[in-house]
Every structure is written in C-alpha cells, then in structure tokens.
Image (tube, rainbow, N blue to C red):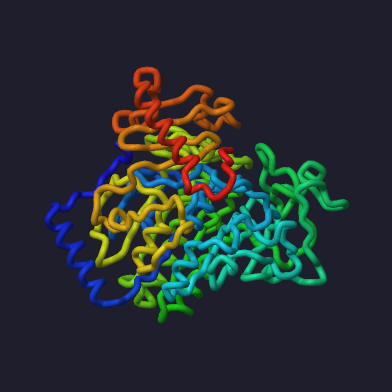
Amino acid sequence: MLKQSFFIKRTASILLLVTISSMVSFGQSNTKPNIIFILADDLGYGDLSVYGGKVQTPNIDRLAHNGILFTNGHSSAATCTPSRYSLVTGEYAWRKQGTGIARGNASLIIDPERTTIADIFHKAGYTNAVIGKWHLGLGPEEGPDWNRDVKPGPLELGFDYSFIIPATGDRVPCVFVENHRVANLDTKDPITVSYDEPIPDEPTYENNPELIKVQSSHGHNQAIVNGIGRIGYMKGGQSALWDDKNIAAVLAAKASAFLETNMSTPFFLYFATHDIHVPRTPHTKFLGKSGLGVRGDAILQLDWTVGQITKTLDHLGLAQKTLIIFSSDNGPVLDDGYVDEAVEKLGDHQPAGALRGNKYSVFEGGTRVPLIISWPGVTAPRTESDALVGQIDFFSSFASLVDQQLVEGDAPDSENVIEAFLGQSKTGRTELVKQAGALAIIKGDWKFIESARTANSNRQKELGRSTEPQLYNLKNDIGETTNLATENPEIVESLGNLLDSIKVSSHASQTNNFN
C-alpha cells in the first residue's frame, strides 16, 4: 500500500450526486473559480502526515480532508527546472535544450512568444501572480543585469505580478526580484554575480571557514551569504539580501497581500515555496519541533505557510470560491549539500513512503509526488484517486476549466484530465513520460525505463539508471524491486516503441535533449 492510512470511501452514488450537483451549480453561476497552485520544493511522497509521514501537517491535511488526495500524481522530471518548465509550458522539458538545472544567472529559458499557463488565465480575465521560487532563468541571452530591469521574466510570460527567488536558496544571487527589479537594492552597492571565477577580495567558503555557520557536505563552497556557503560567487547588494530564516514568512505575506488586493476579481496564484529545499534554515519558532532535525522542521514551516494562505482565504470569504492545488516539484532528498542531520535524525520516517528512489531518480520516488486538490462544493471531501495524472496536464485542464481554446503548438504534451482532477473520473492519462537522466514511461500497470549511457549512483542517491532496459509492474511491485524486462520482451518492445514515437512526435518543438 502506498500510504499508511486511507480515507473512508463514500459510496459511488453519493460521490456522483455531490459532483453533479456541484458542477450544475458552478455552471449556472458563471463564476470563475480563483486558482492557487502551491508547489513545494523537494517534498517527498511520504513526507506529509496525510500520506503516512511522521511529521504532522494539519493545514495540508485539511486540504485533503476537503478534497481529493491523488496516489498516482507526477511531476514530469525528478529535478526542479525541467519540472517547472513543463508545468508552465505544457511541454516535456527534454524536448528543449537548456532546461537542465539552471544556474542562478541563467537567461530566461522560456520563449516569451510561446503561450504559457499564465497566458491562458490572462485571456480568461484573471489577474496572475507568481510568488516564490522561479528557477526558469531571467533576462536576455547574455543573462540578467541585476542592477537594472531584470527582464524578460515572469511579466513577459503572462504574469501580472511577480515576487521571486531567481533560482534556489543555495544559489546566488540571494535576493528577491519584484517584477523587474531586485527588491530593496541600493544602487550605490551594485550586485556582481559570477558562476565561472571567484570575485577578487570576496570571502569564499574554502578561504574563510571562520565565517561559516552552516557546514557544507559537498559543493556549496563558493560565496558566503548569511554565514552559508552557496553555489556561485556574489558581491554587493547587501541591503537586498534575504534573511534565510524569514524567507517563508516573506513569501506568505506577499501571497496574502496579493489575495487581498485581488479579492474582487478572479485570480491565479502560482505560489512556489522555498521549503523544504536546502539550505534548510527554518524560523526559530519551528526549530526542534519536528523531532526529525531541520528537514522535519522545514516541513512544519511549509505546513504553516499553507495555513497562512488558507486563513487569508477564510478571512476574505474566498474559500468556497477558490480551487487549491498542492504538490511538489520532485521527490525528496536528504543530504543535498549541507550538514543538517537530515539522515542522522530521520528515524523511521520514510520521505518517499513505499517508493524507491528520490530526487534525481528515474524510480518512482523521483517523480511520484504528493498531489492534493480542494475546491469546496465541487471536489467531494475525503476522497482518494489513483488516476494517472501529471502536473504537465494542469495547462490543458485549466484551459478547459476557464473555457479557453488552445491553438496548435500550445501545451503540446499536456492532456485535458479536468474530470480526473475534479474527481468526476477515476481515470486520467493513458501514458506519461518522466525524466531523470534517462526517460521512463508509465502505461497501465507497467513502467519501462530506457537504458542509460551510464548506470546509477551519485552521492548515495539512487538514480535508477542502468545500461540495460528496466520493466516494473507497479501494481504488484510499487517499490520497483524486480526488473521484469527479461521475462517480458514483448512489453519492453511495445513500451520502448511507444516512448520512441513520443520522442519524435510532432509535439517536439525543439531539438531533443534527453539529459
């Protein structure tokens, strides 16, 4: 079983009655639902209490109690940049060069001329915002100028407002960008960023260990910001630097302010938390509260953040008018570059639940993620779905929900599975491709992983790659313990051919990049 406790099932007749009556009511009102997509970072399938985890997450659990918990929901990739690219564009990231994990000074990797998920909402009359982690690049081909207008970026992709972490918390620059400008930047203290060479006379992790407050386990040994080693080198911008322990509170406040400002019009909020990505520096009010070290404490902080959003909706009287999606960009990771006792204090908590693998892995633990959808009055409460669905499908599904037609070239790999997302259907996609160095495809009970150029491990992370093809029956072996490729050559051939046909399909708008 995928999790330790399951919801009590309602009878089919009651579910059908609730769904039909709710949808009829929605159709008669001509009211467009507000939509909030909350995307956590590096949160595993087993990290939430509602999925059987040891850390108590009552605010996130409440979303599930009021809606649908998915047991077969997936990100399209096992790392953040390609996963987020697919979410925003509706295209598998492996179709486009340059969609690997982006540097902190990478240029915008999405063509502003293409239609994005935000564009669809904009056409439907929504006000759109992205708040939180971006990690899809910013600026022109030569990269962003942090001291002037930082564009193109989210505003050129259909968002009306953005307040973002440019890349990740462990990458420079360690600043927020609000719309086109670095927030709180003093122009007399300009920012310099380098990912190639150290900046002269600036302290680094290797040269100035006396300045370090959080030790690195690997990498993260270049610039020092707030006593933490980062990836990349940075100088200047002191007034703009974030305070790591306050990131969650700042993002939650910005999200609440957006909701309050736009409470009278339909809105789409893409809220991408920093938690529980490294460096894990939760606020002091969460430290030591989980019993699992700072990784567990960061999960508590994530749950608090979700609670801030739902409390704001309740205060504004918007809860019944708002569809909330909660998910994660990829699977969990323990030691991801800092000495934070994530491994030592894990106890019997299983971040990926019964799944094999983790972030970076082509096994299920890399891409099968928590997915909860709650829309009071429409999604039947305390229900569970094993429909095969992917985050890449929100593009086409949302377009259908807000009565927008897609044209040729829009969201080429996204499928309209809105009935599955709203609990009206028990089935979703027929097949889904997932990326983690090698590609894998799921169809029915079977999962096929293509052979990779090189096999397995990376810093004790089980990547799941093999120079031989792999085949697993997920219905009987969710832990992917037994490779059945040799015993089922016809299934290997069939799924391999299907994967090859998808690779070369007319959907491909860019040169393939399978790494």
Q: Residue lying at the far bottom in this picture: please name it.
A: 264
In the displayed structure, would residue 211 be above or below residue 355? below
Q: Position of residue 355 (x, y in %)?
A: 40, 35
Visible in this render: residue 506? Answer: yes
Please tell me which residue is depicted at 31% across the width and 37% down the height of the picture.
444
Q: Position of residue 23 (x, y in %)?
A: 23, 67
Visible in this render: residue 291? Answer: no
Q: Position of residue 88 (x, y in %)?
A: 50, 58
Please tell me which residue is depicted at 62% across the width and 64% down the height of the picture.
153
- Direction from residue 83 to residue 215 in the image, left or right: right
Using the rendered view, name the quadrant where residue 423 is placed.
Answer: bottom left
Looking at this view, is 427 or 330 the one in front? Answer: 427
- Direction from residue 47 to residue 419 in the image, left or right: left
Quadrant (top left, top right, bottom left, bottom right) of the C terminus:
top right
In the displayed structure, would residue 113 be above or below residue 392? below
Q: Residue lying at the far right in this picture: please name it.
A: 201
- Direction from residue 407 to residue 10 in the image, left or right: left
Looking at this view, is 74 or 353 the one in front? Answer: 74
Q: Position of residue 148 (x, y in %)?
A: 74, 69
Using the rendered view, name the quadrant where residue 417 is placed.
Answer: bottom left
